[in-house]
């Protein structure tokens, strides 16, 4: 930068105005109008999003052109010429505006770009064109692991653009753009190019280290794609380890049945789908989940009932001890009424166990308690709906039966097993039966009739049962699910097609899946003290990660839980190796928490003023002018900015072959209209599948 002859040769103007956000430049009279030839190679100048340099003691400040214009002024006074006697006439003076983006510093190995601006120029400082070497240094990423080529820079003599996967995926990436701007192809391309680059590096290391040619190491990468429109199914067929899941409507196709059984849901997810009320239904729902998940999942339903009976006795013992502590209060209202109703409900619950218990000892305990409670209630008959006074004589005998029972069934102490949020197997029919029993015990059956009907209808819906049903999921363990959907120590691309998932449950399924994936990586880090690098891709993210307001209050909706699951991943996923790619055409509808946690952005064409405004808020004020080109970007062109690139860049994304692209191209209206392409139509077949009717293959 200290070659003054070179600086003078490349000078195109001087600084006219300086602020932290903007630097205005007056161009020289002889500055290039279209093509600059004085940098060694022809380059377009001046152009929006082009680069200029302002030399200083640290090297040179890098500015990106955000505005070009003409201002009429008096005829310029040229240095070294006697023009002072010329009459001043209006003269077109070219100006441009720069956004400062970093420093270009010369090193022993060439040039290096440093983020941020250490000092600003002064008015009158010269502005120069970068040479070809300097242009490449500005746009080429010098990070150690910047090995993945995603495209080239049309503003820097088509220099290849490299990115570092650690920075691109580790701190989350947002790919934003309108329909048809190339967004889906960019998502598919980033996954493919990352895998191909990793394989090239493995092959290179194998050759360099003279490793056995017969043993070809595989890429150890994990990508999980949530695909709401079913576009990515055939994008990666040639890469090998691709698992596809969908809601199956027939036995055809290579995709497997999507499984997210209800035993994997936590209490909040159950509350959201069942719309459980806070005061009455949620406590019993949580208790039912806690007790059902502590039952022996390998036993039959009858043995399972014995296990629940023991939990019931634990609860009964705790309640009786609490009444015992109240002592004299049992003779007063309302305690005497509460105790009488408590005994009635306990008796009803124990009678429901009576026919299902297998263990003879359990049967004897149940019969003894029923007999003793019946005697107490007969001795204290209601009068006009109210119970008379009770005393410890009506409490202690029941406790004595329970104490003596401990010699048969073991200590009746609160269980220390899985809680209501643990992913432990249970059967749906057992769960519903237990809720009914607990509701009866607490004398709140009237609050659970509609609740149980809603949950039962959900669990038996044919469209949903294939995904959440536990009766057909006994073979699917938590270990198998994690292996199938996250993968092992080989290349694993998991594509989850959500297109046929009913709207009433899609948020719940995605919420559970995101939470399980996050918790699995959290526990992996805790157990091995290392992260397991995985990328979770969410296409059409505005449909799944919607912003929500504070007006919802106590309402726990599946949509809100789904958004909160991704907000947690966005805020904490990096610590556990879980990266996030969100692709959306409506950033204004996305959760701003998730969007603000993305450190790298690939911005395709965005036309909506509201969406542009949201995007501009996410970048520093000095970068705002760079985004003015968003409404007119052609397909495959995108602005790359953020943590994964040293400076903001206009990138022409690499083109994917037709067979590797997502199925998101525009419909072929004209070819169908003129019969160049045929379309078979069988609405009867579609109607039968839609209505859930069975039909034979011959039909």
Image: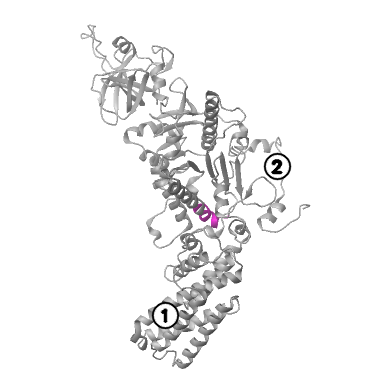
Q: Which mark is residue 47?
A: none
Q: Which residues are magenta?
A: 502-511
- Single out the residue that lies furthest toward the front: 407
Q: First in sequence: mark 2 or mark 1?
A: 1
- Single out the residue that lies furthest toward the right: 698
Up the image or down, 649 lies above or below 664; here it is: above
Instruction: Label 1: state its secondary structure.
Output: helix
- Circle 1 residue: 320
- Single out the residue that lies furthest toward the left: 85
Of 551 and 554, nearer the camera is: 554
Answer yes or no: is residue 614 visible.
Answer: yes
Q: How many marks?
A: 2
Q: Is residue 509 magenta?
A: yes
**Which x, y percent locates residue 191?**
53, 36
Task: Tell me how far mark 2 sits from mark 1, CA to CA.
Answer: 72 Å
Of 286 and 599, nearer the camera is: 286
Instruction: Label 2: state its secondary structure.
Output: loop
Q: Is residue 652 magenta?
A: no
């Amino acid at each position: 930068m200290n070659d003054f002859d070179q600086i003078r040769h490349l000078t195109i103007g001087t600084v006219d105005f300086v602020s932290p956000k903007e630097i205005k430049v007056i161009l020289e009279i002889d500055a290039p109008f279209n093509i600059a030839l004085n940098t060694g190679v022809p380059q377009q100048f001046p152009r929006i999003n082009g680069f200029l340099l302002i030399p200083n003691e640290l090297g040179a400040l890098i500015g990106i052109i955000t505005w070009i214009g003409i201002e009429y002024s008096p005829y310029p006074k040229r240095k070294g010429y006697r023009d002072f006697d010329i009459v001043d006439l209006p003269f077109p003076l070219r100006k441009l505006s720069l956004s400062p983006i970093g420093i270009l510093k010369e090193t022993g190995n060439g040039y290096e770009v440093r983020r941020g601006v250490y000092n600003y120029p002064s008015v009158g400082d010269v502005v120069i064109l970068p040479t070809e070497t300097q242009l490449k240094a500005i746009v080429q990423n010098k990070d150690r692991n910047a090995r993945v080529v995603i495209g080239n820079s049309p503003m820097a003599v088509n220099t290849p653009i490299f990115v570092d996967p650690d920075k691109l995926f580790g701190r989350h990436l947002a790919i934003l753009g309108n329909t048809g701007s190339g967004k889906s192809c960019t998502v598919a391309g980033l996954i493919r190019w990352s895998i191909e680059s990793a394989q090239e590096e493995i092959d290179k290391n194998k050759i360099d280290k003279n490793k056995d040619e017969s043993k070809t190491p595989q890429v150890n990468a994990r990508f999980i794609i949530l695909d709401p429109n079913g576009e990515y199914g055939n994008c990666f067929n040639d890469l090998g380890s691709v698992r596809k899941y969908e809601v199956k409507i027939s036995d055809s196709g290579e995709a497997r049945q999507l499984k997210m059984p209800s035993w994997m849901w936590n209490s909040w997810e159950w509350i959201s789908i069942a719309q459980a009320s806070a005061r009455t239904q949620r406590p019993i729902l949580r208790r039912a989940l806690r007790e059902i998940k502590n039952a022996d999942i390998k036993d039959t339903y009858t043995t399972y009932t014995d296990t629940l009976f023991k939990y019931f006795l634990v609860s009964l013992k705790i309640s009786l001890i609490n009444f015992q502590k109240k002592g004299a209060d049992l003779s007063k209202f309302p305690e005497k009424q509460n105790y009488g109703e408590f005994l009635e409900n306990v008796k009803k619950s124990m009678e429901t166990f009576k026919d299902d218990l297998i263990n003879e000892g359990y049967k004897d305990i149940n019969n003894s308690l029923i007999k003793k409670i019946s005697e107490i209630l007969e001795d204290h008959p209601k009068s006009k709906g109210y119970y008379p006074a009770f005393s410890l004589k009506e409490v202690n005998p029941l406790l004595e039966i329970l104490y003596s029972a401990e010699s048969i069934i073991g200590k009746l102490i609160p269980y220390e097993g899985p809680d209501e949020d643990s992913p432990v197997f249970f059967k749906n029919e057992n769960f519903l039966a237990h809720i009914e029993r607990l509701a009866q015990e607490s004398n709140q059956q009237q609050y659970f009739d509609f609740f149980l009907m809603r949950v039962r209808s959900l669990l038996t819906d044919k469209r949903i049962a294939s995904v959440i049903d536990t009766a057909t999921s006994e073979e699917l363990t938590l270990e198998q699910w994690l292996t199938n959907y996250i993968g092992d120590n080989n290349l694993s691309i998991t594509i989850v097609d959500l297109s046929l998932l009913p709207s009433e449950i899609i948020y719940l399924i995605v919420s559970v899946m995101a939470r399980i994936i996050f918790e699995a990586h959290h526990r992996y880090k805790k157990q091995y003290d290392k992260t397991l690098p995985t990328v979770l891709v969410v296409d059409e993210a505005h449909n799944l990660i919607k912003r929500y307001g504070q007006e919802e209050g106590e309402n726990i909706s599946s949509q809100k839980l789904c958004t909160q699951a991704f907000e947690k991943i966005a805020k904490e996923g990096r610590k556990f190796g879980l990266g996030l790619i969100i692709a959306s055409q409506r950033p204004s509808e996305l959760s701003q928490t998730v969007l603000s946690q993305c450190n790298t952005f690939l911005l395709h064409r965005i036309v909506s003023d509201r969406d542009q405004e949201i995007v501009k808020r996410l970048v520093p004020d000095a970068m705002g002018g760079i985004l003015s080109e968003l409404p007119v970007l052609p397909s495959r062109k995108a602005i790359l900015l953020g943590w994964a690139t040293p400076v903001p860049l206009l990138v022409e994304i690499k083109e994917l072959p037709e067979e590797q692209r997502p199925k998101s191209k525009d419909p072929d209206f004209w070819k169908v209209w003129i019969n160049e392409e045929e379309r078979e139509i069988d609405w009867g077949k579609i109607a039968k599948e839609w209505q859930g009717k069975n039909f034979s293959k011959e039909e």
